Image (tube, grey):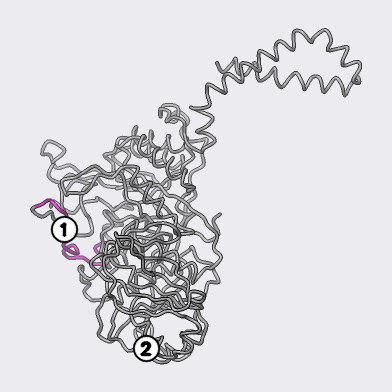
């Protein structure tokens, strides 16, 4: 079939080419006489060639041409030809690294953090204020969460609002205030600067009425809204930029906002009740943006938290163009993996022009032999050359290698499942209750930075012994770790690729005074490490721990809602044993939404296209 198509194509190209040469050489009349004798035969050959080419195109369109134009792979070829090629035709994904820069403490309890690599090099610093002075620790925790998001745009300084000094805001590009304590008395100097300094201010939740009372005339003319409560209950969603976002905190009220002059105060988002009732949730007037509740509680991948993440562009990077990129990470690849299956998925993604990452667990262990007929079993990458060969193949076909823990389990115990690599927590303790739900208990016994460093070095040594390049990115198993662990990773890696457990400032850290935070874009967390976002989860079957089934349609729907973030990243992970069908479905779905698949380092650089 290929030779027939080639013959037809040659006929189509050769006929006008020869005619052009003859016209140039002998003139039009002589060329005409030259072709008179050839007309019958050549025209027939051209006609046959044209029919063959058009017929082949029609037959191939649904399977080859259309998917190729759409940027998706028509089929996933076997890995046999790829093995023979050895990856020589493809350059490996470029490596990337960064220096972790932990925040520094200053006078009066301030904490200052550096920007993520995503920020402009000349970006100004943002001041983040929270209610201090013995108020609930959740206020500072919310401020830390906000600081991580702000790092996407530039450096930040975090401090209690009681320490604010007159005209301090003028030294910053913007101010974010998180009101968590209705009883807090805000410094008059802070209120005056918000009203008169013209610095952009994002005000969250409580105490905006103190600002209104400070200068009622200015408030009425420049801001023109009033807030009270919180007494608006039953809100289960927030509509922002035409997209309905979920709200899990239905038991918590939202502050009631009343617009007194719609020409001055613009409603950017509405909270909605199931009965259709709508209430202002996000308002903008002059230099002030106001959110009628804290959007940092009970967050999920489809939550109104996305609206908060996007409005930061208005405050800190107005004029940012719309851009939507996607990341895919293959997950839980240990020395016990099937190398043929790994290369099959990598081949499929390479054919579809989808760059990807892959999380590698360098040491496999089954300490009680649950999967090995009762025989305790441990081996590393160096003991599985075929798996190492597959990892090299993946790297040469668009993959970026990530170190995914060391053993992805903890000692001899069920933590909480079986103790076998790839199933359990490694840097956190967990158990299952009587209903088989996973309960996170806290930090591992004897946790310390030194302990974690020793564990990380064991894993890195395994990559070296196997002849693999040193991973530049780390991912915590099940995204669970303590402050010591985050600090240790920051000493060995410039990047992480996961979510973060953000803790309130306490020593020793209290595992129950924390939040699990996902990111809509690249950030630098409060431990100083740049974090590649993962925010859509994975395809999953129903489990004994009552986890719900999640298919490609769920991930695609979450990515659709994530489009409200104007320069956001839709990021998911996938387990190679599931085969290629579902991952191809997700790729098609995200591309249909307008996402472009890129490599991790591209979403972590301000200069990336």
Decide: is 336 above or below 230: above
Observer-nearest of 146 and 213: 213
Relative image position of residue 554 (x, y in whole percent): 33, 46
Check whether the beta carbons of the residues at disc 2 and disc 1 lie within 8 A of each other: no
Q: CA distance from mark 2 to mark 1?
A: 39 Å
Of the numbered discs in the image, which one, if any, rests on residue 163?
2
Decide: is 187 above or below 404: below
**How many numbered badges does the structure rendering display?**
2
Task: Specify whether residue 376 is painted magenta.
Answer: no
Question: Which quadrant of the structure image shows residue 110?
Answer: bottom left
Q: Which residues, given as a range, are shown in magenta?
A: 435-452
Q: Secondary structure at mark 2?
A: helix
Left or right: residue 573 versus residue 55 is: left
Which residue is the site of mark 1?
A: 439
Relative image position of residue 340 (x, y in whole percent): 34, 32
Relative image position of residue 582 (x, y in whole percent): 35, 38
Residue found at x 21% / y 47%: 423
For label 1, count other residues whose C-alpha is less than 10 Å away and answer few (under 14), some (14-19) or many (20+): few
Question: Which quadrant of the structure image shows residue 298?
Answer: bottom left
Task: Specify whether residue 439 is painted magenta.
Answer: yes
Observer-nearest of 395 and 252: 252
Residue found at x 43% / y 38%: 349
Residue found at x 27% / y 52%: 406
């Amino acid at each position: 079939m290929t030779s027939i198509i080639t013959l037809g194509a040659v006929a189509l190209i050769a006929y006008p080419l020869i005619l052009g040469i003859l016209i140039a050489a002998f003139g039009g009349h002589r060329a005409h006489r030259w072709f008179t004798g050839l007309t019958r035969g050549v025209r027939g050959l051209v006609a046959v060639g044209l029919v063959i080419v058009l017929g082949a195109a029609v037959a191939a369109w649904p399977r080859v041409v259309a998917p190729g134009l759409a940027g998706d792979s028509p089929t996933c070829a076997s890995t046999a030809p790829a093995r023979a090629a050895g990856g020589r035709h493809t350059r490996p994904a470029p490596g990337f690294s960064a220096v972790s820069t932990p925040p520094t403490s200053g006078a009066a309890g301030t904490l200052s953090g550096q920007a993520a690599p995503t920020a402009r090099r000349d970006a100004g610093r943002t001041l983040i204020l929270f209610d201090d002075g013995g108020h609930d620790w959740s206020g500072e925790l919310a401020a830390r969460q906000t600081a991580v998001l702000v790092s996407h745009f530039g450096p930040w300084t975090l401090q209690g609002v009681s320490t604010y000094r007159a005209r301090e805001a003028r030294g910053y590009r913007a101010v974010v205030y998180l009101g968590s304590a209705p009883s807090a008395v805000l410094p008059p100097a802070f209120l005056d600067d918000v009203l008169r300094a013209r610095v952009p201010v994002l005000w969250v939740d409580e105490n905006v009425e103190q600002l209104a009372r400070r200068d009622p005339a200015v408030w009425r003319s420049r801001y023109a809204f009033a807030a009270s409560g919180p007494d608006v209950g039953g809100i289960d969603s927030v509509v922002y930029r035409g997209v309905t976002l979920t709200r899990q905190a239905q038991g918590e009220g939202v502050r009631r906002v009343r617009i007194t002059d719609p020409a001055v105060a613009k409603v950017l988002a509405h909270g909605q009740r199931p009965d259709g009732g709508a209430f202002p949730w996000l308002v903008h007037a002059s230099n002030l943006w106001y959110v009628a509740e804290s959007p940092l509680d009970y967050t999920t991948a489809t939550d109104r938290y996305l609206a908060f993440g996007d409005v930061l562009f208005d405050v800190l990077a107005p004029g940012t163009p719309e851009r939507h990129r996607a990341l895919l990470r293959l997950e839980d690849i240990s020395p016990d993996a099937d190398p043929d299956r790994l290369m099959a998925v990598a081949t499929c993604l390479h054919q579809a022009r989808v760059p990807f990452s892959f999380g590698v667990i360098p040491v496999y262990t089954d300490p009680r032999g649950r999967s090995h007929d009762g025989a305790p079993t441990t081996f590393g990458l160096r003991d599985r050359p075929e798996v190492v060969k597959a990892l090299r193949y993946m790297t040469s076909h668009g993959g970026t290698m990530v170190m995914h823990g060391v053993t992805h389990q903890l000692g001899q115990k069920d933590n909480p499942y079986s103790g076998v690599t790839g199933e359990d927590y490694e840097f956190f303790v967990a158990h299952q209750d009587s209903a088989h739900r996973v309960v996170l208990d806290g930090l591992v016994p004897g946790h310390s930075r030194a302990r974690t460093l020793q564990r990380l070095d064991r894993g890195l040594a395994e990559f070296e012994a196997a002849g693999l390049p040193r991973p530049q990115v780390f991912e915590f198993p099940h995204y669970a770790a303590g402050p010591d662990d985050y600090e240790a990773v920051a000493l060995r890696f410039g990047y992480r690729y996961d979510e973060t457990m953000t803790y309130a400032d306490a020593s020793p850290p209290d595992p129950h005074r924390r939040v699990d935070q996902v990111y809509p874009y690249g950030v630098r967390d409060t431990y100083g490490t740049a974090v590649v976002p993962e925010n859509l989860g994975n395809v999953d079957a129903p489990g004994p721990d009552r986890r719900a089934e999640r298919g490609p349609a769920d991930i695609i729907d979450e990515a659709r809602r994530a489009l409200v973030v104007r320069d956001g990243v839709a990021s998911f992970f996938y387990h190679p044993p599931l085969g290629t069908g579902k991952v191809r479905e997700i790729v098609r779905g995200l591309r249909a939404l307008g996402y472009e698949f890129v490599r991790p380092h591209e979403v972590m650089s301000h200069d990336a296209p």
